[in-house]
Image (spheres, helix red, strand yellow):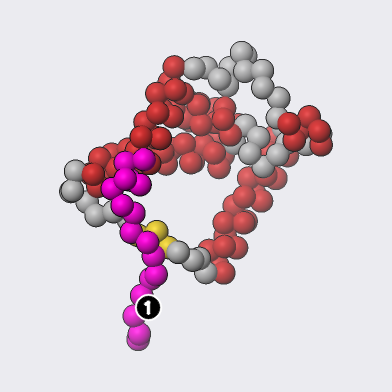
Amino acid sequence: MRSRSVAGYRLGSVEIALVGAVALAGIAVARSHALWRDRFQVVCPAWAVLGVPCPTCGATRAVVAVMQGELSVALAWNPLAALLGVGAVISVPFVALVLGGRMTAPRVPTSLGTVSRTAIIAVFVANWLYLLRYFGG
């Protein structure tokens, strides 16, 4: 059996630090603001114009809810965004390990196969169908 080499790009220290900084800043902002509660008055432009929620509807509220420890609320607002928010929280210790030299930086693929692309599209479509049902679009 032939071994298949995976083409990819190894992230550098600056990129890893940037990921960590963005994740920490997001956590800090989300912990100090109740954006998803009653005071959140931003209307989605796509919903206002088209009358249906866009694929990212509820994403801000979902990520803020994750950062405030309200996972069930986050999953209700936007499941995909909630999972990405959880990923941001989980990434912080890994960033520290990579920057501290205790772990090697991950290799990011430069291209995706057909199955991977199809799976990603299917996840986005499933999330949007959920949002259309949840928000009544």
Using the image, determine if residue 18 lies above or below residue 60.
Answer: below
Residue 117 appears at what percent x and percent y?
A: 57, 62
Residue 18 appears at what percent x and percent y?
A: 36, 40
Residue at position x 70%, y 45% from top? 129
Residue 93 appears at what percent x and percent y?
A: 28, 39
Using the image, determine if residue 3 lies above or below residue 7.
Answer: below
Secondary structure found at label 1:
loop
Residue in front for this viewpoint, 110 or 69: 110
Please provide the residue range marked out in magenta: 1-18
- Direction from residue 78 to residue 133 in the image, left or right: right
Kindly indicate the quadrant of the structure image that contains residue 25: top left
Residue in front for this viewpoint, 87 or 104: 104
Confirm whether the magenta stretch covers residue 96.
no
Please state which amino acid type lies under the numbered disc 1. Answer: Arg
The residue that mark 1 highlights is 4
Residue at position x 62%, y 18% from top? 40
Residue farthest along the right direction in this orientation: 50
